[in-house]
Amino acid sequence: MKNKTIAILFVFFAITSIGHAQNLKLGEGESFINVNGVDHWVKVKGVSNNTIPLIIIHGGPGGHNYSFERTIGPLLEKHVTIIYYEQRGCGRSKASKDTTAYTLSILIDDLEELRKALKIEKMNLLGFSFGAELAARYTAVYPNHVEKLILSCPAEISTSVILVQIQGLYQLADSNLRLKIDNILKENIPILDKWLKIWVHTSTAFFDEFSFYNPEAAKLNRSLWMKSNLPHEGSHHLQRVIFENAKGDLLETIEGLNTETLIISGIHDKNGGLQYGLYINKILPRSELKIYMKSAHFPDIDETERYAKDVITFITKN
């Protein structure tokens, strides 16, 4: 009996060691990993923390992780293993030769193949904006691969979010822009084209006011975007294909998902709207919602210190 107990304990510790040591296989630094025929930019930091990796999933569609790497990222890297990656056709990743290959199902499959390539058994996901939708949809398909889920200012690519944004644009607009918005809304064209056309009439200063609560945070983000020399919206084909293939069923898809989830929402968010965070909190049984009173769509930059503390606490707690 004693020998049997020792054998069981040996097997237990061996399995535990294998699971805990999986992150040691990750190499610190930047690389390109070919996933489904497309080279994806990947950067690994904080390997010495030896935690379940936290995968950062940027927004957009068509965004990148450049600002995140240089603002909130260094604070997180002190405590957890971080893996930044950029979606196909975004940031430093290469574009697909097939201009129609940018659907949500393809992006979900890219993330799964990336997990396999990195030999990660379990991972934590942090998705912001559109990235939150991608992270949530991935978790719904592969719940056994996700330990914890963080949804930062979640937004769904759908007609409803387009209408939320148009409403937010209208609230901030001066009389001249409001007249342009009114005229565009009267045009007999699809809502997606109306939305894109309205954004053409806005300035970078207007976008910054729309997206941030703190003007200094907006300036910092803008300077980092300029320094990155990376397109923030990806390619025209990328955005249009993703929007035209949007399902608009995110809430139905993830309802009842049992993954432990942290939802972070800025109360001044006019991009995706606070209502998504509130509703997701209602339909996920193991979720908690934190509302940031001095943030808009980028609480990671508007309230960096609090954001870092909340994420680290959530990821590291048992």
Image (tube, rainbow, N blue to C red):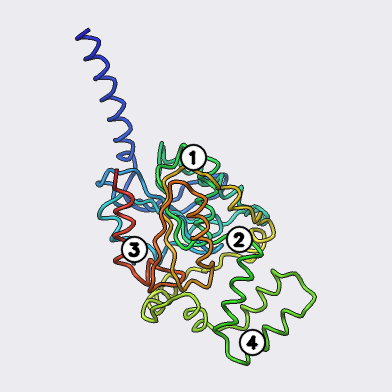
Q: Amino acid at mark 1?
A: Pro
Q: Which residue is mark 4?
A: 178
Q: Whole-Å distance between the Cαs marked 2 and 4?
A: 24 Å
Q: Answer with mark 4 or mark 1, whichever residue precedes in sequence.
A: 1
Q: Amino acid at mark 3?
A: Tyr
> CB under 8 Å between callouts 3 and 1?
no
Q: Please tell me which residue is depicted at 31% across the width and 30% down the height of the picture.
A: 18
Q: Whole-Å distance between the Cαs marked 2 and 1?
A: 22 Å
Q: Answer with mark 2 or mark 3, whichever residue precedes in sequence.
A: 2
Q: Answer with mark 3 or mark 1, whichever residue precedes in sequence.
A: 1
Q: Whole-Å distance between the Cαs marked 2 and 3?
A: 24 Å
Q: Whole-Å distance between the Cαs marked 4 and 1?
A: 44 Å
Q: Quadrant of residue 96?
A: bottom right
Q: Quadrant of residue 85?
A: bottom left
Q: Residue pushed farthest top?
A: 1
Give the total of numbered labels.
4
Q: Which residue is mark 2?
A: 157
> CB under 8 Å between callouts 2 and 4?
no
Q: Which residue is mark 1?
A: 143
Give residue 161's position: percent from left, percent from top: 60, 66
> CB under 8 Å between callouts 4 and 3?
no
Instruction: Please determine whether, in this image, residue 308 is positioned above or below residue 178.
Output: above
